[in-house]
Amino acid sequence: MSNQKNNPLHGITLEAILIFLENKYGWEELGNKININCFKSDPSIKSSLKFLRRTEWARKKVEELYIDSI
């Protein structure tokens, strides 16, 4: 039995999560919801991915927002 069956993040890339959140909220609202510079200063999917892949706490916040948003 797989533990991933109940994990809403299973099989979803960080990029897909970011695209979903950016489409739903826009960069400005994302920056208000999660106070990180990659959402506030010249935001892009590419720069945000680079930051979030290196920064565990920020990635967790993005994943939590995604779960709350679906």
Image (cartoon, grey):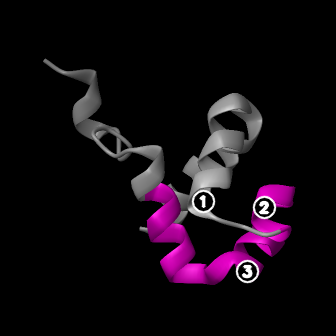
In primary-sequence order, the first of circles 1 and 2 is 2
Q: Which residues are magenta?
A: 17-41
Label 3 is placed on what type of residue? Glu
Label 1 is placed on what type of residue? Leu
Q: Secondary structure at mark 1?
A: helix
Q: Which residue position holds label 1? A: 65
Are dots 1 and 2 in contact, CB under 8 Å? yes
Label 2 is placed on what type of residue? Ile
Numbered label attached to residue 34: 2
Q: Residue furthest top?
A: 1
Numbered label attached to residue 54: none
State how far apart marks 3 and 2 are (Cα). Answer: 9 Å
* Helix, strand or loop: magenta stretch: helix
In the depicted structure, whether residue 2 falls above or below residue 4: above
Are dots 1 and 3 in contact, CB under 8 Å? no
Q: Secondary structure at mark 2?
A: loop
State how far apart marks 1 and 2 are (Cα). Answer: 9 Å
Neighbour tally class for label 3: few under 14, some 14-19, many 20 plus, Cα within 10 Å: some
The residue at the point 27 percent across, 29 percent down is 4
Tell me the quarter of the picture where residue 60 sits.
top right
- The answer to whether 61 appears left or right of 5 in the picture is right
In the depicted structure, whether residue 57 falls above or below residue 23: above
What x and y, as percent, mark residue 44?
Answer: 64, 65
